[in-house]
Amino acid sequence: MKSAMRAASPSSSFHLLKSKLNFSQSKQFLRTSSSNLLQQQQHQHQQQQQQQQCSASTSKPQSSHASNPQLLFPCLDKREQKTKDLTSGQLKPIHSANSLESGPEPSYGFVTTGFKTYKSKKPIFLDYGGHLPEYEIAYETWGKLNQDKSNLVLIHTGLSASSHAKSQPDNTKPGWWENFIGPDKFIDTNKFFVVCTNVLGGCYGSTGPSSIDPANNERYATSFPILSVNDMVRAQRELVRDEFQVLKIHASVGASMGGMQSLAYAWEFPDEVEKVISISGCARSHPYSIALRHTQRQVLMSDPNWNRGFYYDNIPPHVGMKLAREIATVTYRSGPEWEYRFGRFRADESRPPALCPDFLVETYLDHAGEKFCLEYDANSWLYVSKAMDLFDLSESTRKKAQEVREKSEQVYKNNAADNIRKLKATAQDNSCSGVVPEVPYKEKSTHPTKHTVEESLEDLKRGMRKMANKDVLVVGVESDILFPVWQQREIANVLTTNPDNLTGRIEYFELGTDISNYGHDTFLLSLNDIGKPVKAFLESS
């Protein structure tokens, strides 16, 4: 179905392109995957049971007078053994590209080499009062920069992705958008010079909590300052200017948190970007998404090995990280996909039910968490996910952030020891620390500065007026529960009704459940469906 909605001006347009495609091939693939996975998991489950018959010996002895035999917990035994192996130094992280070979999964490989590094010796002042005296940004490139330097496409990543979006001579492993970028691909490297970075706060080569603080030569840990998505793109902009001498990029492109960054880049530097593509993103984080990420952080911080972030010389919080990733994985996919892929199959129907992973979907989540728990830095997860929660392009939020940064920069500019102490005090005043209330907050606050839903939307519209006259493509996915499609529609509606928009072309493309049931991960898995509108938009004049 293709329909046009009234634009703010004759020169701007709003397109809803909701294609109707046959999903039967995807269903057949998922059924086949489920059958293969069932056989694989049954075999693995039987092996584990045979190997761990003695597991009850590590638990509290069962009373001889119990009515029923004590359950075995091989999953807990496995965690305890991993902790012992980490303590003794016998366990090394095992890195693989796929969560489960029997089904469609994103390729998020562990990246430690093969990227270039931009090093800034200038401080960066942050939205919530902190600063970094210097920082590094890891990046990779594909294609060639043209003579007038007008073809740079900047790729922004999701929460846990590295700069390795595609294989290249210095790292030949497949990237997380391997078949999306390249010669004649959806982002065509015959036409564009493509740059992808690891975000500030990450752990794949860019400065983050695991980096060394030059002030004391120790890891930042949780003395790392709170970040915003806008902080991330300001660091990226320095890279673009200093490394490539590019004053205006052709496009700012990203999905998920990358979709936030693509908008933030255009908001921060509207005269320095030609086009914007935001896939499965939002213009401000909403309570439901915040709640999902909050739950993950609370689980992670409850692992005693997290030690308030100071774990680098000890055992990493692998249990908390694993469980946080399992929760995240639930938000990345969709129920309909898992109906076809796993159904209600158990790993071994011949055995009685267990409290350890038993259903196929449970073993899938267990494997996804296990694979990830030592691949990504726990503190980076906390800081970057918090930055996602804080994201808001509303006028009041951005105005306050600018005031805080300007105050910090003013205090810092003379670089005197007394000023550094004042700067730390400023950062503390604007930190996220707070007192947990003894009773829950009321659902509707009577605080005079709180906005109604309507006032909040008007605040967002005022904030996004800076993006007037930009060509913007917004892509949403109906099966996405983490960034529901109404959040992408909000972006398109706000931009379309911008009274200052005289020449900007706003396009909205939505993938229905008849096209993809992969949920939030659609941008990593349904490449053809996502790629067609992206390619057309990038290459249009």
Image: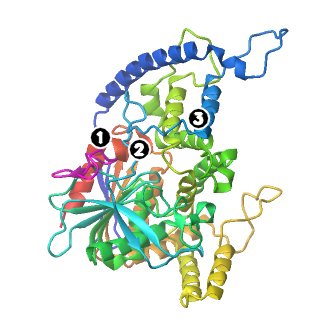
Q: Which residues are magenta?
A: 167-185
Q: Residue at the spot x=56%, y=76% of the render?
A: 401
What amino acid is labelled 2 in the image? Asp
**Disc 3 element:** helix
Residue 227 x/y as whole percent: 54, 66
What amino acid is labelled 1 in the image? Lys
> How many C-alpha atoms fall within 10 Å of the one at disc 2: few (<14), some, or many (≥20)?
many
**Numbered circle sitting on residue 521:** 2
Outermost residue, right side:
65
**For the residues bearing labels 2 and 3, Cβ distance under 8 angstroms:** no
Q: Earlier in the sequence, mark 3 or mark 1?
A: 1
Residue 436 x/y as whole percent: 77, 59
Q: Earlier in the sequence, mark 1 or mark 2?
A: 1
Residue that mark 3 sits on: 85
What amino acid is labelled 3 in the image? Asp
Instruction: Check the image and report above or below for 237 versus 182.
Output: below
**For the residues bearing labels 1 and 2, Cβ distance under 8 angstroms:** no
Residue 209 in view, yes or no: yes
Residue 373 x/y as whole percent: 53, 42
* Corner quadrant of residue 444: bottom right
486 or 471: nearer the viewer: 471
Prevailing secondary structure class for the magenta stretch in the rendered image: loop
Q: Residue at the spot x=65%, y=87% of the render?
A: 418
Instruction: Check the image and report above or below for 144 versus 319.
Output: below
Q: Is residue 193 magenta?
A: no
Q: Residue at the spot x=51%, y=76% of the render?
A: 133
Residue that mark 1 sits on: 20
